[in-house]
Image (cartoon, rainbow, N blue to C red):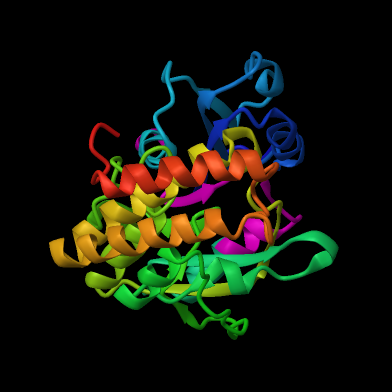
Amino acid sequence: MTVGVPILTAVAPHWHDEEHLSVLVRNWPRDARFELIVVDNGSDGDLAELTGDRSNVRVLDPGRNLGFGAAVNRGAAEAGGDLILILNTDAHPRPDSLEALVRGMKRHPDAAGLAPRLLGASDVAQASWQLRRLPTLGTLVGYCCFVEPAPLPEPASGAPVEQPAACALLLRRSAFESAGAMDERFWPAWFEDVDLARRLAHQSDRVLYWPEAVFRHRLGASVPKLGYGAFLAAYYRNLDLYARKHHGRGAVLLLRAVLVGAALLRIALLPLRCPRRARGRVEASAGLWRLAIAAAGGWRGR
């Protein structure tokens, strides 16, 4: 292992994903310049067994599920590097990708961060999902109708990106801290990275696309463990919080009304089409009913 002070610290919140975490740790370079901090939001075993012989890999155990955003903040506070890599446990860098990120930050000293290239199954780039524009009110209405925005073409190397996904996102510590870090109210996940991207943009910080660094990513590994109904509740409750923060009370009321109507319509259409994230129509119906009731009630008690 290279001896030295970390220059890059990856912070990986972990929640019952030991299979992917073990691959991440096993392939993490034995190089003290690259530190990996795993924040254990929930596990099915002793994570120390994965990291016992790795001096540049640490596990932080807060004793409860902090949520993704708070776990990132906890890990960043303990990080030794000035570059913070926010990382999902199912996003694994290819050899030399960490070096490529460091080189990219040296080449672009005015950039707040870099978004690497994500590859999914069969080496298909995930740029259309990973890199999006910051959502307008119209985009949020689309989400409430269960409609994703139109995909963007993969940008050129070094091009600015408005809303990079935080499954693999490198930021300078100074930019992360000056933006106020992650808003921990977005629990347990979803929209905390959109909110951070908006705050970075507000202070004129740029994040650039950097495909020289490549990560293999299994998209959405946590949703099957969470369950369809719990996913819907977390996702749309956090969308509601994001809208309150950045679009105002009137937008929130509009979005809630649209979501209730769209959820009831989707229930009616279940005989024709079952949502892909649900394990079946019964689970989908129950999750959508609960979503409609929660949104109609203004998410009270949630």
Q: Position of residue 149 (x, y in %)?
A: 50, 75
Which is nearer the eye, 25 or 141? 141
Q: Is residue 81 visible?
A: no
Q: Quadrant of the N terminus?
A: top right
Q: Position of residue 121 (x, y in %)?
A: 80, 60
Q: Is residue 298 above or below residue 198?
A: above
Which is nearer the eye, 105 or 154? 154
Q: Is residue 300 left or right of residue 216?
A: left
Q: In this view, does 228 lie to the left or right of 93?
A: left
Asked whether residue 179 is drawn in magenta, I would say no
Which is nearer the eye, 65 or 118? 65
Q: Is residue 180 visible?
A: yes
Which is nearer the eye, 205 or 295? 295
Which residue range is magenta in the image?
A: 77-101
Residue at left offset 47%, top offset 19%? 61
Q: In this view, does 118 lie to the left or right of 155?
A: right
Residue at left offset 62%, top offset 81%? 154
Q: Is residue 240 above or below residue 116?
A: above
Q: Position of residue 78 (x, y in %)?
A: 39, 33
Q: In this view, does 199 lie above or below 176?
A: below
Residue at left offset 85%, top offset 64%? 122
Residue 157 figure quarter:
bottom right
Residue at left offset 33%, top offset 42%? 294
